[in-house]
């Protein structure tokens, strides 16, 4: 594919996509994942770690099978996302940034995800859900086994 | 007003075929028959100002970059859209990707760039797929590649997917990130137009800025300037959220009043409640009181009302909103997103949020409000970039406009 072949004219621009690929494979930014990226790009391990730990979306610890990312920025809290967050915490017995013991869900309180017009909103893995209610949020999550 | 969102009304607007059937890529073809410098001049004459927040004249940026003899030059689209309350670039990215591609191709031709990147925020995975498909289709149809439309112009375009750092929306942090570094801003000057990506001349514009280009080239600067106000010409996308009946993205002429946006387009305040306050341009613009409804929304008039146009992301608050808590939440956001490079921002914003936290939990001290003002003053203008400034002016805005409520005086109303 044209795009893929020429995608990164500058070698420097490879680190971000390489880390995404490593995270897809390893599930999180494990030491091995970072080491493999450093080896592949011929970069000092410290550079890779420094980069990976700067960006929120590179997971600093293992996560569950499904990651619930609920927005808790201004418009979403005006629309009740704090209540939703504590309901999720209660139901699954985890605080934000924790994972259920069965490994099914991780919970993340997000900064703005750009869905303020349809708040409150969340991203589960890579799927967007908007106009959440106390009822809809649980029926949506039922689909993530 | 239907220029930036025009194609969205056509079925399959994301598809190349749908885009072309509604007039797409005509401007590119026209542009490639013009001299690059004539396009730059046209953009300069139009007075188009960047839509990412700062309102810098696009034509001036393009002129400086195109006159710099260093090669190659690069073009970057800022699709990081991380400013809370802002979701105006999203309809272009998800529903009208070819408008962005066409705008970038014209711009690349004008400034002499052969490579372009779209720096897309990690929270928009859907947009990533749509953009990548649109780019592949554009290559196949000859709108991107080594010999665009057979006219000997080369431009390659790639999507670079960010990973959740708001600071990477700041242009020099974005360049650092593109170069495989932590997203920490650079000191300016040198500006990216002279030393940007890989130390080469680089033009960075917002998604919406590029989306204005095809229309501007099609009708010319003179017709373009008839939209909006003399100092802020053109159409503007406003994303409206919070306590309005019809939140969403609206395309309106620059200078449309706050009143018209809230009451005519967005159907007024939800549940018949009273308007209390508005944040006009994303959370880094100062909050305004309910008596500023006659303010025209543009780069020149908002400062007269003590705020800024910013990204055009309005957040509307009704009488029930707890503004002290909102202020805390915004400050926590900035604290979380500070890259840590400059001390006044890294430490100062953290102090602001811990003071606000104790104020919100009823443990505030009488001198806290003054302390907030003093810390804000010590952040302002003392850092590499404007992130800390955003936090400082926002806290000042809350204190200046809603002091009784910020002081926690019972039943206080501004
Ligand atoms: C902290 C910070 C965050 C920013 N975030 C964005 C953003 O998400 N999108 C954007 O277009 N501009 C953002 N900007 C503004 C950019 O630095 C830059 O001015 C803009 O991309 C230039 O494009 P324009 O002239 O077309 O507006 C941000 C600036 C700062 C200081």
Image (tube, coloured by chain):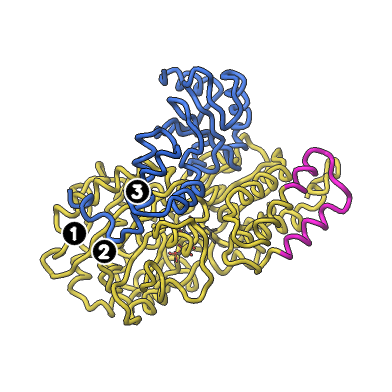
Chain colours: A blue, B yellow
Counting every numbered tag in the picture gives: 3
Q: Chain of mark 2?
A: B
- Measure how far apart labels 3 and 2 are at the Cα level: 36 Å
Describe residue A110's horizontal placement relative to residue B118 as left or right: right
User: Within the magenta stretch, is there residue A2?
Assistant: no
Q: Residues within 10 Å of mark 1 (few under 14, many from 20)?
A: many
Disc 2 and disc 1 on one polypeptide chain: yes
- Measure how far apart labels 2 and 1 are at the Cα level: 8 Å
User: Judging from the image, what secondary structure is the residue with disc 1 in?
Assistant: loop
Mark 1 vs 3: CB contact within 8 A: no
Q: Earlier in the sequence, mark 2 or mark 1?
A: 2
Mark 2 vs 1: CB contact within 8 A: yes
Which residue matches tag 2?
B105
Q: Position of residue B70 (x, y in %)?
A: 32, 79
Mark 3 vs 2: CB contact within 8 A: no
Image mark for residue B143: 1
Q: Chain of mark 3?
A: A
Q: Residues within 10 Å of mark 2 (few under 14, many from 20)?
A: many
């Amino acid at each position: 594919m044209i795009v893929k072949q020429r995608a990164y004219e500058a070698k420097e621009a490879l680190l971000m996509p390489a880390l995404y690929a490593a995270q897809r494979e390893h599930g999180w930014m494990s030491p091995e994942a970072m080491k493999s990226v450093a080896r592949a790009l011929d970069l000092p391990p410290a550079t890779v770690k420094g980069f990976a730990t700067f960006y929120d979306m590179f997971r600093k610890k293992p996560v569950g099978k499904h990651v619930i990312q609920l927005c808790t920025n201004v418009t979403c809290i005006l629309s009740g996302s704090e209540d939703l967050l504590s309901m999720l915490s209660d139901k699954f017995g985890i605080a934000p940034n924790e994972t259920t013991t069965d490994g099914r869900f991780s919970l993340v309180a997000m900064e703005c995800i750009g869905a303020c017009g349809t708040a409150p909103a969340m991203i589960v893995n890579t799927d967007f859900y908007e106009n959440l209610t106390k009822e809809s949020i649980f029926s949506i999550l039922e689909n993530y086994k | 007003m239907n220029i930036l969102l025009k194609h969205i009304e056509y079925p399959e607007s994301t598809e190349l075929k749908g885009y072309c059937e509604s007039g797409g890529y005509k401007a590119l073809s026209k542009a490639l028959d013009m001299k690059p410098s004539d396009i730059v001049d046209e953009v300069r004459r139009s007075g188009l100002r960047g839509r990412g927040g700062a309102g810098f004249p696009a034509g001036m940026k393009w002129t400086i970059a195109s006159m710099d003899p260093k090669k190659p030059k690069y073009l970057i689209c800022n699709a990081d859209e991380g400013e809370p309350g802002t979701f105006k670039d999203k309809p272009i990215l998800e529903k009208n990707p070819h408008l962005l591609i066409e705008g970038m191709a014209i711009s690349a031709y004008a400034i002499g760039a052969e490579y372009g990147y779209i720096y897309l925020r990690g929270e928009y995975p859907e947009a990533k797929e749509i953009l990548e498909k649109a780019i592949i289709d554009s290559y196949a149809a000859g709108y991107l590649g080594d010999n665009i439309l057979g006219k000997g112009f080369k431009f390659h375009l790639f999507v670079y997917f960010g990973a959740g750092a708001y600071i990477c929306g700041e242009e020099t942090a974005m360049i650092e990130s593109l170069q495989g570094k932590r997203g920490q801003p650079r000191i300016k000057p040198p500006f990216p137009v002279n030393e940007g990506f890989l130390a080469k001349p680089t033009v960075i514009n917002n998604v919406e800025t590029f989306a204005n280009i095809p229309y501007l080239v099609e009708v010319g600067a003179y017709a373009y300037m008839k939209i909006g106000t003399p100092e802020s010409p053109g159409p503007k996308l406003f994303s409206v959220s919070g306590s309005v009946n019809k939140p969403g993205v609206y395309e309106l002429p620059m200078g449309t009043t706050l009143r018209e946006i809230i009451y005519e387009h967005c159907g007024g305040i939800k549940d018949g409640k009273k308007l209390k306050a508005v944040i006009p341009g994303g959370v880094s613009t100062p909050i305004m009181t309910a008596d500023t409804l006659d303010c025209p929304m543009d780069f020149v008039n908002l400062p007269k009302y003590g705020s800024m146009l910013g990204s055009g992301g309005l957040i509307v608050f009704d009488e029930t909103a707890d503004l002290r808590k909102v202020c805390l939440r915004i400050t926590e956001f900035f604290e979380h997103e500070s890259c840590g490079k400059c001390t006044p921002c890294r430490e100062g914003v953290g102090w602001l949020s811990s003071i606000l936290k104790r104020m919100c939990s009823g443990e505030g001290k009488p001198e806290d409000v003054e302390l907030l003002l003093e810390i804000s003053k010590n952040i302002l203008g003392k850092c590499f970039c404007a992130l800390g400034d955003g936090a400082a002016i926002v806290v000042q805005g809350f204190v200046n406009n809603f002091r009784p409520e910020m002081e926690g005086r019972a039943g206080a109303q501004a």
